Amino acid sequence: MNQLNLIWELEIQNEAIERYKIELANFNEYTRLKEMTQKSNEVKLSLNLIEEKISMGNQEIRKLERSLKESDYLKKKLENDLYGGSIRGGKQLEQLTHERERTIEKIDNLESSILELLDRLDNLEAEHDNLEREHVLILNEIDNLQEIIEALVKKHNSKIYKLEEERASLIPQIDRDILARYEASRLKRGKGIVPVIDDVCSGCNVRIPTYLLQDLRKQEEFIYCESCGRLLYYIEKDEKEKIGI
Ligand SMILES: [Zn+2]
């Protein structure tokens, strides 16, 4: 391989390494995984809220049940007083009867409150179960995505490693000054060498003068584009397909 061909090879390696590195960076930004992670956090938050509501509801029920027990006890006590034969007069009878009615009303209210609350808790439990099932699915998808991404990252890293090894074996064969000029061009223009495709510089799309094409075809001399200053490399049509341009 002459120096020009070596530079061209080097460019192909560099471009491939860059492409893989960009893809590698994109994996970490993988949108679906981000979406799913966010969704998982949202569902977790909803689950916490529902759990809090359930716990508060249970506390409330215990409170109501204590009240109910007290009222039941009071009702029994009032009924003992009423029917125990110890009533001393009409006023006391009226008072006890009234109090018993009020207690019965309170018991009714407490019982319907408890039923209502139990109903609400049932709904909350059902909602919680649904969300929990959804959360399991989300977590599974996150696991799968992470596995896929990990495999892709591993594959890409090994490709990059192989390309870097190939590049490292090219470097010592290239003249130091030529390499320096190439690296400077890559830094300045993004590319160190550009293919001439269909007689056009692919760096700036300007047609190459006919008198240069003859020499370019030989792939021996260092010829720079008169328009953009990039180092040129002539590519035959069948070669074009081979490197995927
Ligand atoms: Zn050009």
Image (cartoon, rainbow, N blue to C red):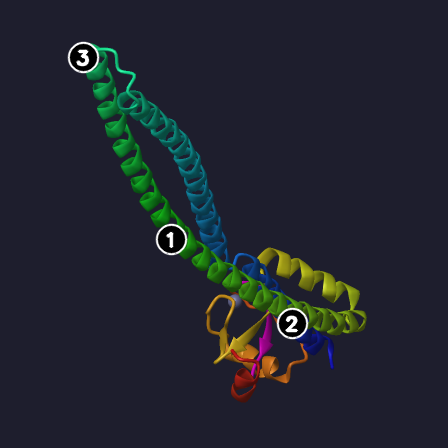
Where residue 221 sits: x, y (%)?
Answer: 67, 76
Mark 1 neighbour class, 10 Å CA radius: few under 14, some 14 to 19, many 20 or more? few
Q: Which residue is mark 3?
A: 90
Say which amino acid is labelled 3. Answer: Gly
Query: SS for tag 3?
Result: helix
Mark 2 or mark 3, which is nearer to you? Answer: 3
Among all residues in the image, which is located at the extreme front?
85
Q: Which residue is mark 1?
A: 126
Report the residue at 54% width, 60% height from top.
26
Where is residue 50, by image quadrant? top left
Say which amino acid is labelled 1. Answer: Ala
Mark 2 neighbour class, 10 Å CA radius: few under 14, some 14 to 19, many 20 or more? some
Tell me which numbered mark, 2 or 3, is placed earlier along the sequence: 3
Report the residue at 33% width, 28% height from top.
76
Is residue 234 inside the magenta stretch?
Answer: yes
Query: SS for tag 2?
Result: helix
